[in-house]
Each structure stands twice: as C-alpha cells, then as structure tokens.
Image (cartoon, grey):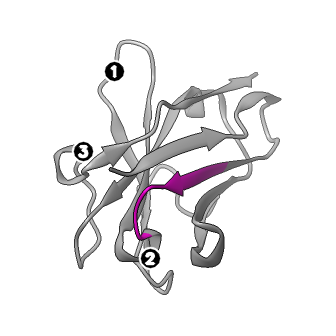
Amino acid sequence: QVQLVESGGGLVQAGGSLRLSCAASGGTFSSFVMGWFRQAPGKEREFVATISRSGATTLYADSVKGRFTISRENVRNTVYLQMNSLKPEDTAVYYCAAAGTLVLRIRTREYDYWGQGTQVTVSS
C-alpha cells in the first residue's frame, strides 16, 4: 500500500509562486507514474500535470502550461509541483497521485493511490 502526503500549500497573492511536495512511502516510488490534480469548490477534480517514472517525460494541462513544472526525485521518493505566475483561478485543493503504469495518465480513474490534498489559495 502506497501512502502519499502533500505539503507546501498556502495563501499567495496573484503572480506569486508556491512549490508543492508529495512524499511517498510503502512502495517502490520509481515504479509509479506520478500526477498532480486539483479540485476547486463545486468542480470536478481535474488533471494538472504528470511525470514518467524516470522523470524524463512530462505532460501538462493547457491551463498551467508554461507556469507550472512537475519534477521528481526518486532517491527521495518525492514529486514536486513548482507553481509560478499564480492566478486566482488556480485556487483549489491540490492532490498528488500514483499510477502503476508504464505510460503517462491524465484521468483520475487511471491512478491507484491518492494523497489527502493541500489547499492552495491565490488572492487577487
């Protein structure tokens, strides 16, 4: 069983930056594709970014492309989400997730494990 714990959320002004971290335990971290998703109040959970097992390949939602960067450190069992040029519409609970798959995934149902989430609030 894999456990995922997110951290790094908080309140930031528009245009600011935050870096989210997700620490994994209980499994072989390097065998999982990792993803970040977010869920705003009253909306469905949506894909943000995903990264391959080696970290060589990434994929982003159009809404965050050029502003967010996903990365991972397999030796630390951690995946990160660097968020720059934040906008009020980025306000949401951010979740990391792990998928036991060979290819990148963007659908929530394709992920096997989820963290509890961390709140990101961007004020205008």
Q: Quadrant of residue 51?
A: bottom left
In the image, residue 51 above or below residue 113: below
Mark 1 and mark 2: Cα distance apart in space: 31 Å
> Which comes sooner in the sequence, label 3 or label 1?
1
- Give the residue pinned by disc 1: 43
In the image, residue 56 above or below residue 115: below
The question of residue 27 being in magenta is answered with: yes
> Which comes sooner in the sequence, label 1 or label 2?
2
Q: Secondary structure at mark 3?
A: helix
Inspect the image, locate mark 2, and give the three-letter code of the amino acid beneath it.
Ser
Whether tag 1 and tag 2 are in contact, CB under 8 A, the answer is no
Whether tag 3 and tag 2 are in contact, CB under 8 A, the answer is no
**Image coordinates for residue 18, horizontal then vertical, percent:** 76, 45
Look at 36% across and 68% down and name the residue there: 33
Look at 45% across and 69% down and name the residue there: 29
Q: Tell which of 36 and 48 is nearer to you.
A: 36
- Give the residue pinned by disc 3: 108
Q: Secondary structure at mark 1?
A: loop
- Give the residue pinned by disc 2: 30
> Which comes sooner in the sequence, label 3 or label 2?
2
Q: Specify the segment rendered in magenta.
A: 21-28
Mark 3 or 2: the one toward you: 2
